[in-house]
Image: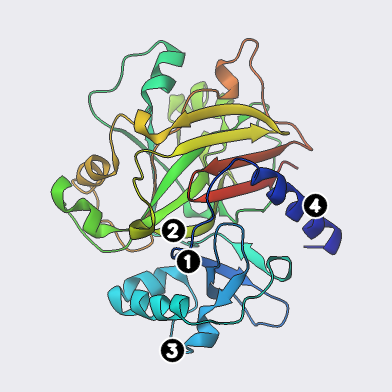
């Protein structure tokens, strides 16, 4: 990213922090790149909006991708815990490029109509069972990457979502055991081409959800023990500074545990798999008249305790 772009991003981040969230001292795992380093590295974000501690410098035996890190389980997490406790040098935020906290997950599982208030906005009944769809892993981009408007769609919309990151492999997981399979949480932007989702492709949602760049994630994977209650977090989306979605994850119809139990009936969940848990009301397609994203827009998706992701639309 060019220096001027970095400055704009830092300004936007500082503005975003006006929402009075407490910076976290907890474990916030990131994937990042820096000019003096070769390839992606694993790090710790030193508080919400802080700089980055290079985990691979602290322990060169650690893997450099989040999926491999999560596959190592408690052993890798304990190394990260030691790094957090040590007074290690912090790379300034302006000197690093944040990648998605998880890249190339085995799958990105999504949940539709999972907020009570979002169902009300559409005048539809609250689902009796989770509505599951998917995005391809190739749609995943970093927390400050650009969202590219595809020429094939004229109706690209925003959706802020809480994302669950799986930490332990499992199939037929009981709801009571589900949190043992969770590594943590992050912020997701489920960018959606409504024309392809609602009218084209036989009304199957997949294509409208999975254009390249349609799944910004980040900035950090905040470990589950660092989040007081994932089902009681303020969740918000702003387009060009205007609040368009504002709710709380307590509006979720099916909570994390129920979703993991449901999804794992059908598929094996692997470390690094991502579950997008649904969006609150305020999306563009249900406004009167409908509003869609256009070139030059900036979308900020923010969740209390987790952070903010900022994506320019190009």
Rounded to the nearest angstrom, the CA distance separating label 4 from label 2 is 25 Å
The label on residue 8 is: 4
Q: Position of residue 179 (x, y in %)?
A: 24, 54
- In terms of depth relative to the viewer, which is nearer, 160 or 213? 160
Number of numbered discs overlaid on the protein picture = 4
Residue pictured at 36% horizontal, 22% vertical:
116
Of mark 2 and mark 1, the one earlier in the sequence is 1
Going by the picture, which residue comes out furthest to the bottom? 60
Which marked residue is nearer to the observer: mark 3 or mark 2?
2
User: Are dots 2 and 1 in contact, CB under 8 Å?
Assistant: yes
Rounded to the nearest angstrom, the CA distance separating label 1 from label 4 is 24 Å
Rounded to the nearest angstrom, the CA distance separating label 3 from label 4 is 36 Å
Question: Which residue is under mark 1?
Answer: 29
Of mark 3 and mark 2, the one earlier in the sequence is 3
Residue pictured at 25% horizontal, 63% vertical:
169
Q: Secondary structure at mark 1?
A: strand
Point out the image quarter for the C terminus. top right
Of mark 3 and mark 4, the one earlier in the sequence is 4
51 vs 20: above or below: below
Q: Secondary structure at mark 2?
A: strand
- In terms of depth relative to the viewer, which is nearer, 265 or 272? 272
Question: Which residue is under mark 2?
Answer: 222
Rounded to the nearest angstrom, the CA distance separating label 1 from label 3 is 17 Å
User: Are dots 1 and 4 in contact, CB under 8 Å?
Assistant: no
Question: Which residue is under mark 3?
Answer: 61
Of mark 1 and mark 4, the one earlier in the sequence is 4
Of mark 1 and mark 3, the one earlier in the sequence is 1
């Amino acid at each position: 990213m060019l220096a001027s772009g970095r400055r704009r991003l830092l300004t936007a981040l500082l503005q975003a922090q006006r929402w009075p969230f407490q910076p976290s001292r907890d474990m916030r795992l990131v994937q990042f790149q820096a000019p003096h380093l070769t390839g992606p590295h694993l790090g710790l974000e030193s508080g919400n909006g802080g700089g980055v501690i290079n985990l691979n410098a602290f322990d060169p035996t650690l893997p450099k991708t989040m999926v491999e890190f999560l596959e190592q389980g408690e052993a890798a997490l304990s190394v990260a815990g030691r790094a957090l406790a040590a007074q290690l040098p912090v790379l300034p935020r302006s000197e690093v490029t944040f990648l998605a906290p998880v890249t190339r997950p085995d799958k990105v599982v999504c949940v539709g109509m999972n907020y009570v208030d979002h169902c009300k906005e559409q005048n539809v009944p609250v689902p009796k069972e989770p509505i599951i769809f998917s995005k391809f892993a190739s749609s995943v981009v970093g927390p400050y990457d650009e969202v590219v408007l595809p020429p094939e769609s004229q109706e690209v919309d925003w959706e802020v979502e809480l994302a669950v990151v799986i930490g332990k492999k499992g199939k037929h997981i009981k709801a009571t055991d589900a949190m043992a399979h969770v590594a943590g949480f992050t912020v997701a932007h489920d960018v959606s081409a409504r024309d392809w989702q609602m009218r084209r492709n036989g009304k199957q949602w997949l294509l409208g959800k999975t254009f390249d760049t349609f799944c910004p994630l980040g900035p950090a994977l905040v470990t589950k023990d660092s989040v007081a209650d994932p089902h009681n977090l303020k969740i918000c989306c702003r387009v060009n500074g205007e609040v368009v979605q504002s709710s709380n994850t307590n509006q979720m119809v099916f909570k994390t545990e129920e979703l993991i139990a449901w999804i794992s009936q059908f598929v094996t969940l692997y470390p690094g798999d991502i579950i997008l848990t649904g969006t609150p009301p305020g999306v563009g397609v249900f406004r009167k008249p409908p509003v869609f994203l256009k070139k030059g827009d900036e979308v900020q998706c923010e969740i209390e305790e987790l952070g903010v992701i900022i994506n320019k639309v190009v």
